[in-house]
Every structure is written in C-alpha cells, then in structure tokens.
Amino acid sequence: MRSLAVVTVLLSALACSPSGGSAAPTPAARPPVQDAGAPGIGDRDFPLDGNGGYDVAHYGLKLGYDPGRRFLTGTATVQASAKQALSRFNLDLAGLTVDQVSVDGAKATFDRKGDELTIVPAAPIADGARFTTVITYSGRPQPVKDSSNLGTYGFIPTQDGAFVTCEPNGAKTWFPANDHPADKARFDFEITVPKGLVALANGEMSRPATTSGGKTTYHWRERHPMATYLATMTLGKFELRQGRTPSGIPNLTAADPRFRSALDRLHTNTGKITDYWATVFGPYPFSSTGGVVDDFPAGYALENQTKPMYGGFDPDESIVAHELAHQWFGNSLTIKRWRDLWLNEGFATYAEWLWSEHSGRSTAETIFAGFRARPASDPMWAYPPGKARPGDLFNESVYTRGGMTLHALRKAVGDQVFFKLVKEWATTNRHRHVSTEQFVALAEKRSGKQLDSLFDAWLFQPRRPA
Ligand SMILES: [Zn+2]
C-alpha cells in the first residue's frame, strides 16, 4: 500500500515521485459454549479480525455483480481444517444478507452480530478434520470508510463496476473470510458481469471467458497462498495488455479507458521492475505479474497479489517499484500481526530508494540523509515503526523510518552482507509467515554482529536515533 498524499513528500523533492443481514434461528440462551472457535485470530491490536479454531486452505468464490443495481450475489466455498474441536466457528462478513449455510453438505444454522458470522454445523467438527463450508449470500456491498489514514477501502462501487482493495480488513465487505493475514489460502474466482465489462482477480485466468445471455464469466486462479486483504475482483471497462517480462514472466496489465495513455508505460515498467527485483530479492514468487489503473480516485495504490491496483492516477516508476517489491515483502512473506507492518512497508519504501539508486537518480544514502536531517521534533521520531498502531497503522513512520531501518542495517553490515541477507530472507521464507524477531535473528546470524541496539533505536524507541 502506498498513499500518494502522505508518504512521498520528501522523496518527491529528491527523486521523481508523483505524485444487516437476516439471521437464522439463534440459540435462545448463550451460556459459554464448549468448543467454540474464537471470534478473533489472536492479533491483540485487531481483536475481532480473523477467527480462531481453524485454518482455511482454499476459497472458491462464485460471484456475480450488477453495477447498475450495485448488487452482488455470491456463493463462497471455504475449505478449512480444524485446529481444535469445533461446535461452532466464525467467519468475518460485513453487511450483505446470508441466505444459507452448509457444512460438509448438511444445513447449518448461523447468527450475525457486527461483522461476525457464527456458524453452528449440524454435527460438531473433530480436531484436525477437514471441512467445507458453503455460504450463499447477496446484497449491496459497502466499503469501509471510517479508517484514519486509508480513506475508503474494501469493495468500492464505481461508475462502471468496482475497485476492490482490502488492506487491512476489507475482504469481509465482499466475501465471508478468515479476514486476517495470519491465515493465507489459495483462491479460485468465477465472476459474472454484464457483457462488455472485464472482471480482474488474482493469479491467472484458469479458462477463457465465456459470454451468454448478455453476461460474461471470468475464471481466475491464484494457486499460491494469499492473504485475504490481497484478494480483488476489480471490474469495469478495461483495456488489457498481455505479454511477458523480458525474462519471461507472464505480465497482464489493464487500464480504465480514462487512463489508456498510461497503459504502455505501466506494462513496460511492470515488466522491467519485476525482473529487476528478481535479481535483488530472488526468484519472483508468483506465476504472473501485472498492474491495474482504475479511475476510482483512491489516492493510493495497493499491492493486490500479482495485480497491484493504482487508484485513479498514472503510476510512476517509484510507486510501481514499491507495489512490485510487496510481491516479495507482504505477499510472499506475510506478517502474522499488523504491528509488524514495517516488514511490508519499510521494505517496499526501501525498494523505492533502491530503484532510484539503480536508475541513476538519488542514492539510497542521499534519500536516507534527507530524512535523517529532519528535526528531533518531527512526528516521525515519536512513532516507533516496529509497533504499528491499530488506529494509525499506515503512519508515515512505518514507511520512512522502516526504510531507514534497513538503510541503517546496510551501513552497519556492509553491502555484501546486506544484499545477501535480504535475498536469503525473501527466499527461505517464500510463501510463509514472518516476524520482526525472525528478521533480527537472521541479520545477526549472517552479519555475526550484535544488532539489538540498532533495531531497538530504529524500530522501538519514540525518538530520533542518535
Ligand atoms: Zn506499501
């Protein structure tokens, strides 16, 4: 994720930057229920995000959207395995009307409260068992609007379709999800829209689009694990460009007709930057790359897996470099708790500086020195980026001081160790979950240096490092 407004101020000076559902029968009394899955996955900063007691392996989402009525119909097939005995469990779902739920083919009862959908299967699920939940639902999706530094996110209806960007917890605005990055899963999408529109989701098209009765159906498959916030079903009028990067990775880019003139440049930059990051961070972690420019003026870009979304602007190289670096840092390597967000945003911001350096513009050292010169009273120094705060998750410090942390590390261990370490980090943790503690441990191991005071000063202290 990168906002256009907040993060680019100094960099642009130095470099070249741009710019209620119905409820089924509810148990009458609610004594503590044995073997109930927890309503949150255990991130203390976001206590109701995700759910406990199971792990999702696959989402099969069959979706239809009518932009005229702004109406979504969905059938979600969620394959999961129980991590405890479950007499009931939750999914996250905001708004929309649930029509029916089944578990392993047997009708289940369910209950809605806030953004929690509680499902009571006909028979309890045994610890370790695999089970399949099918939820049919429909309604007018509403994006999340109350966020402090994100503006609007989730399923956002547009004039010709929808712009769908869900970080940190907006997947629940369009499908029932274990909506927290600690549970990644594979996805299949079957999306039906009025003929003439294009529906874009993650991964690759698993079969050609078919049109009948004035509607076109698109099939997409993301066969690598993906966090729910990276899923998309952005749809509307799009011009597409299909090809390969110079090294041969399939590359699909798209632009709303209003941004037609941006498409060639996006396509070329996406190809060359994806390939360059593969030389710096190790092999590209997914089966295709790409990017989408829609006309919704989001004021930010989001690194949706395999298809970053640029909301209403023609992206320059710097922001493309940022979103594509996230394919490694955030998408392949995924955080288990949001307070580690600097592992996504600090790396993606530092990637912007590396791209600037690679392109013969300002070096990372020059950019670092510019930020380092900010007065001690600058708010960035009061916000420790290693503890991203739930109400101010995307604070500039998480980006800039996060990136500065990596540059301070690079200076402490030298270029050779630093770049080897970054590549090892991305390669050995490919498609896994990571934490700050793991990164610090690897940095110390590979450099042979005691680095706790460096990381403590840059990540955890509410003041400018000495
Ligand atoms: Zn970002």
Image (cartoon, helix red, strand yellow):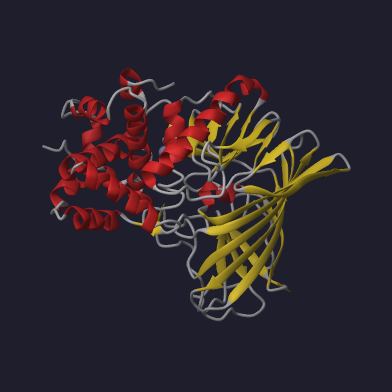
Q: Position of residue 395 (x, y in %)?
A: 34, 37
Determine whether 87 is above or below 202 in the image.
below
Q: Quadrant of the N terminus?
A: top left
Which of 163/218 is in front? 218
Apparent side of residue 215 relative to residue 191 in the rendered image (left or right): right
For the point 28% across and 44% down, the residue is: 419
Above or below, 99 against 258 in this view is: below
**Which residue of the protein is positioned furthest toward the front in this rendering?**
247
Q: How many labels were placed on the picture?
A: 0
Locate ligand 1 by image quadrant.
Answer: top left
The quarter in which the C terminus is drawn is top left
Decide if residue 102 is on the left or right side of residue 446. right
Residue at the far left: name it: 466
Which quarter of the figure has residue 446?
A: bottom left
- Quarter of the figure with residue 129: bottom right
Q: Is residue 284 visible?
A: yes
Residue 261, percent from left and from top: 61, 19
**Residue 31 vs residue 17: left or right?**
right
Find residue 380 and report its horizontal and vertical position in percent: 25, 33
